Each structure stands twice: as C-alpha cells, then as structure tokens.
Amino acid sequence: MTALTAPALDAAIRDPDNPAHLMVIKDVPRRIRIYQGASLLADSQHALRVLEIGKSFYDPVIYVPQADLKTRLGFVDKSSHCPIKGEASYVSHDGEEIGWVYKTPVPMAAKLAGCYAFWPSKVRLVEGE
C-alpha cells in the first residue's frame, strides 16, 4: 500500500513503520463542553480534533486539556499502545470507563500530552455556544 498524499496531509503525523497510518491534529476554534448525563466533565476553548487513518478512516476525536476538566476522573487498570500517539491510560467517572488520556505521548504527538478524549457512546459533546 502506498502512503496517502495530498497537500492537506503534508503536515500529518505518520507511523514510521506504516506511512499509510497517519493523523492530523487540529485546533477546535469553538467552545467544547462534554457531559455524562447532567454532569459537566469538561468545558474548553482549547480543544483539539484528531483525524486519523489507520486500519480504517476513524471518526474524528475531540481531546480536551486536563486544565479544562470540571470533575475528577478515576483511572481504570487498562492501557493500550498506538504507534503514532503512545501509551493510553483509560479513565472513569462514577465507576464507568468513559475515555482515555495520553499522559506522555510519543514526541511526534506531544500536542496531545495530558489531553482527555471520551467514548462518544458514553458522553454528550456540545460544540459551540
């Protein structure tokens, strides 16, 4: 398989062992709020949107900085590894696993350090006012 090329992907972060596995990290220019039920988990003006292509074209994922969390999250005894992001630690709220964080991502994904992402089926994301 050849690596995907297009001007919009020139700045993409690519897996050195598989150039077809890539991601683009973009700033979100609008306010992001994330809820679990009535609980506000995060409120951010500094969120990031990650667009990733790997085994398939994944749904975009919103990441919010730890400073924008509005509640305390617990950690789940679980981790996973992504070659273009690093080691993910999983988080919970009210005893339910709801997302993940890259505490110390690989250098090429440093912009994601300490940013939290949430499973879309477990939270409600509001973009904009």
Image: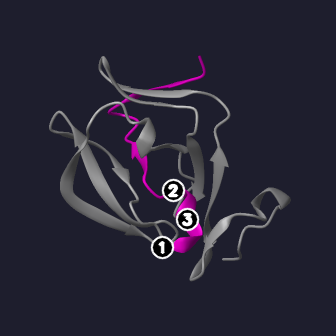
Find the residue positioned furthest to the right: 7
Q: Which residue is mark 3?
A: 109
For label 1, the SS is loop
Which numbered disc, 1 or 3, marks the residue that appears first in the sequence? 1
Q: Which residue is mark 1?
A: 83
Of residues 58 and 77, the one drawn nearer to the viewer in this rendering: 77
Amino acid type at mark 3: Ala
Compared with residue 52, is residue 18 higher up or lower down, i.e. above or below?
A: below
Question: Residue drawn at (47%, 58%), measured in percent from left and top?
Answer: 113
Place residue 20 in its image quadrant. Answer: bottom right
Q: Nearer the viewer, mark 2 or mark 1?
A: 2
Distance from the alpha carbon under mark 2 to that under mark 1: 14 Å
Question: Residue drawn at (43%, 41%), measured in percent from left and top?
Answer: 67
Place residue 37 in its image quadrant. Answer: top left
Spot occupied by residue 129 in the image (x, y as percentages of width and height): 59, 16
For label 2, the SS is helix
Q: Which residue is mark 2?
A: 112
Distance from the alpha carbon under mark 1 to that under mark 3: 10 Å
Read off the magenta span.
Answer: 107-129
Q: Are marks 1 and 3 in contact (CB under 8 Å)?
A: no
Q: Are marks 2 and 1 in contact (CB under 8 Å)?
A: no
Spot occupied by residue 33 in the image (x, y as percentages of width and height): 47, 26
Compared with residue 39, is residue 1 higher up or lower down, i.e. above or below?
A: below
Which numbered disc, 2 or 1, marks the residue that appears first in the sequence? 1
Q: Quadrant of the N terminus?
A: bottom right
Amino acid type at mark 1: Pro
| Callout 2 crowding tier (Cα within 10 Å): few <14, some 14–19, many ≥20 | many
Q: Are marks 2 and 3 in contact (CB under 8 Å)?
A: yes
Is residue 109 highlighted in magenta? yes
Q: Nearer the viewer, mark 1 or mark 3?
A: 3
Distance from the alpha carbon under mark 2 to that under mark 3: 6 Å
On the rendered structure, is 82 left or right of 111?
Answer: left
